[in-house]
Image (cartoon, rainbow, N blue to C red):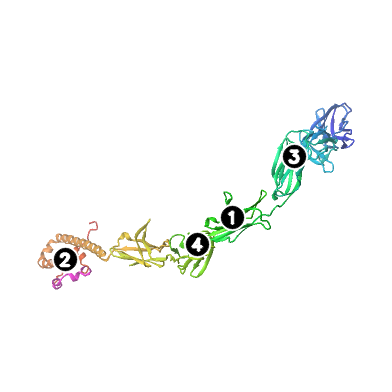
Amino acid sequence: QVFTFNRVEIRVLPSVEVKNGAPMAIICHADISKNTDFQLKHNFTIFKDGKLVFMTISDKEDARYDIPVAKSSDTGDYECTVKADGKLSFSNSVYVWVSGMTKPILTADKREVLEGEVVKLRCELPEEVPPLEFFFRKIKTNSAPKEKRVPEQTQNFSEVEYYVEEGDNILQFDCFGKRQVRSGWESSEHSNKTLVTVKEPFIKPTLTTRPSRNVTEGDQIEFECSTVVAQMRNIEIILQKNRTILNSVRDKKLLKYSAVATQEDSGEYLCKVEQGAVSKTTKLNVFVSELFPKPTLSASRTKVDENEETILNCSINGFQRPNFSIVQKSSSGDILLKKSSVLTMRVTVNDTGSYTCKAEVKGIVKESKPVRINVYAPVSTPTLSVVSGSPEVVLGKPLQLICHSVMGTPPITFTFYKGDEVKKNVTNDTYAIFLNENIGLNDNGGYKCDARNNHSSGVKTSNVLNVTVIVPIRDASLGSIPYGEVEAGSETAFLCSVKEGTWPIHFKFFKKTDREVLLHETSEYSDRTIWHKKTMKRKDTGTYYCMASNRASVDVRSRPITISVILAAWQKGIIAAFVLTAIAGAVAVALWWFLCKKKKAKGSSMEMSGSALAPNLTNEKLTRQSSDGNYYSGSGYIEDNENHMKSPDESKGPDLESAEVDYTEVEVSTLDPHR
């Protein structure tokens, strides 16, 4: 018994698109080839979206999965597998779409509600599988429906609450659902409409005024606001004007409010009744006619010198009967000055301020616009000074001057001058500041300022201020005499100078080693200074520089110079004398040793010629001793600067010059180098 799977296929009847509620069938067919006609058991399995939905065992090559009533949840990918005698084969996937959704069912928890209450709705899509989206609609007569969208991921129903607003009389609600398919979104038909009747908890309030809505200032006006309530619980009545609450009552049906009418009471009044979330309002306009106009306050002078008079006058055009009073305004309250329409004041500086007058008729008080009175004390003579305190300024730096008046009522106008030229005008309380940003050499004098205010005394002028312009140090240089090489023990003069700078100038001399060593400092009313170093020593060899500064507080450093201290001439002579003496001594010892050796070797020969040689040796010895004595006279050689420069011949004397010299042959042997 040999067989093989040719193919496995799946078919949908009547088609892959089925209407919701119609029957449908999924057929799985196995195409098998056999070598003989024998019975074969087939294990059929049908899957939807990867989940097992049908399974059967049959000896036929077809299996049928019937769905009598197709629902939208039956939409999906179907495939089947066939297993026979250990062999397994798969079909391709087929997408089946059940178009249309079941009709949703809508229910409401109440069929009759009060304004301000809440209606709870439930919309259900039976036989549908989440995820789903639900849409609820609130339908009012002559208005567009209000819609709410609620997604549901795990259930096929949804619940929502609707607030019943004022004016909602008869309401209708419905709902529908949506699901997502491959081609997009599919919607269900709308549910049944649910009717909800709305009742008012109270009626719209009534607002009235007595005696009428048109009254005159000073009349008594009374407001009444009332309503009819279904349930006297947590109800409140409020009377407002321009967002200001005038009166309110709670758990009552009537509100009353009365006042003496003023012109400011004209306007719109609002009566509001509230209970829970429900609010109803009624508006009413009231007009209050003027009993008399506002008074007018005038002053004979508004800018007054100290200790002078001004007259305040209060009046109403065409109306002479009011009771007048004049007051001064202050932060602590009004100060009554006089109950009259006229006030004469001899003023002081403390009287500066705002004044009004008040008029009263039939209990109605009206106030005029304020009048400002300014009392001025004269300015004192200003003082002009440098802000830093020092009357000095560095060339090129800013100069800041302050002009100050101790006395005088502000505002005070200050004017700065340089010579007769106006530099700046400043209005301030007691002082003003002038800044010259870049001082030049010619900006050293002629500064003054004047001050004035609204007092009739006029302008006061300060003293003339001169300043000192400090020129900073420029280009310091250092020199020395002698320059470069200096003999030890001699004096050296160091000269430090600058090209320009205001005197006095402070000079400092430094020697640069591993650290900077200050050698000398001095202050001079000059552009240069000389420092004498009396005795130079070998340790004074090195690099030198100088530094100069003045009141500009800027240190200027010179270029360094190098000084080498060498030996003096007399020191060189002493060293040469010692060296020559040492050489001469060595030569004399060597010659003496040689002669002694020769004498011993040729004693007989020396004896034969001794009578002739003795005088000559004697003269030669005397001559050598005389010469040696002059070379070693170290004290005379060192102390006498002239003698040490003379030749040996000049120091022999006249006797030696005339002495007769005998010559003798001498045989000299070679010296032993090791000795």
> Are the two marked residues, 1 and 4, in contact with CB atoms closer than 8 angstroms?
no
The three-letter code of the residue at mark 1 reads Ser
N-terminal of the two: label 4 or label 3? 3
Question: On the picture, is 265 further left or further right than 519?
Answer: right
Distance from the alpha carbon under mark 1 to that under mark 4:
23 Å
Secondary element at image label 2: helix
Residue positioned most to the front: 321
The three-letter code of the residue at mark 2 reads Arg
> Are the two marked residues, 1 and 3, in contact with CB atoms closer than 8 angstroms?
no
The three-letter code of the residue at mark 3 reads Val
Residue located beneath label 1 in the image: 354
The stretch drawn in magenta includes residue 644: yes
| 1 or 2: mark nearer the eye | 1
Residue located beneath label 4 in the image: 379
Secondary element at image label 3: strand
Question: On the picture, is 502 further left or further right than 187?
Answer: left
Q: Give the range drawn in magenta.
A: 643-658
Residue located beneath label 2 in the image: 624
Residue located beneath label 3 in the image: 273
Q: In which quarter of the image is the C terminus?
A: bottom left
In this orientation, which residue lies closer to the viewer: 133 or 272?
Answer: 272
Distance from the alpha carbon under mark 4 to that under mark 2:
111 Å
Q: Is residue 150 above or below residue 398?
A: above
Q: In this view, does 263 lie above or below 405?
A: above
**Image coordinates for residue 620, horizontal then vertical, percent:** 14, 67
Task: Say few, some or many: other residues with alpha carbon within 10 Å of mark 1 (under 14 / 14 to 19 / 20 or more).
Answer: some
> Are the two marked residues, 4 and 2, in contact with CB atoms closer than 8 angstroms?
no
N-terminal of the two: label 1 or label 3? 3
Secondary element at image label 4: loop
> Are the two marked residues, 3 and 2, in contact with CB atoms closer than 8 angstroms?
no
